[in-house]
Amino acid sequence: MTVALFRRIASPKKALTGAAVAAATTGMLFAAAPAQAAPAAASTGKAQAIAHKLIPDAAQYKAFSKIVEHESGWNVTATNASSGAYGLVQALPGSKMASAGADWKTNPQTQIKWGLDYMNSRYGSPVAAWNFWQSHGWY
């Protein structure tokens, strides 16, 4: 039954949730490791200012910001120890963001550009991505 459950799950984030449920049902210990703690206010403010500049529409920025707050707490180097997701938008794998720039590991602008492109191409907009996130707990 567990194998069938994992085959039906399309997303790695959903697979982790499925694994946690399966482990809990069988009595196994499974501790989820959240992304690292949020960075200092100065770097958070810098990343938010960059996002505001790249996303001038208030509703789109607010949705993008909510996703980033939930995913990484605006920490550019946030790493999820369980999945390996990385950065502001928790790209999986993080190296996907190299398509937006070679400095993807440390540059909030590169990560924001990649995340915005991802949200626009997969969901149509940050607002649509946030709507999906709210109903699924991931995007």
Image (cartoon, rainbow, N blue to C red):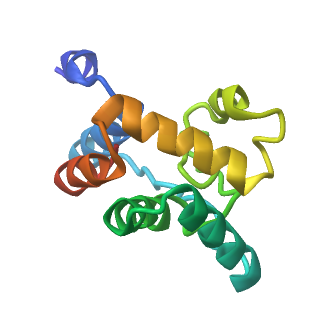
> What residue sits 26% from the left and 17% below the top?
3
**Which one is in front, 54 or 79?**
54
Residue 75, position in %: x, y?
65, 64
Q: Classify residue 30 as left or right of residue 97.
A: left
Q: Can you name the residue that lies furthest to the front here?
A: 56
Q: Quadrant of the C terminus?
A: top left
Q: Is residue 85 visible?
A: no
The extreme bottom residue here reads 41
Residue 115 shows in the view: yes
Image position, residue 63 (x, y; %): 35, 62
Q: Position of residue 97 (x, y in %)?
A: 66, 34
Number of callouts: 0
Where does the N terminus fall, quadrant-wise? top left
| Above or below, 30 relative to 71 | above
Q: Tell me where residue 105 sits by quadrant.
A: top right
Position of 76 compared to 90: left or right?
A: right
86 vs 35: above or below: above
From the viewer's side, name the closer residue of 82 and 129.
Answer: 129
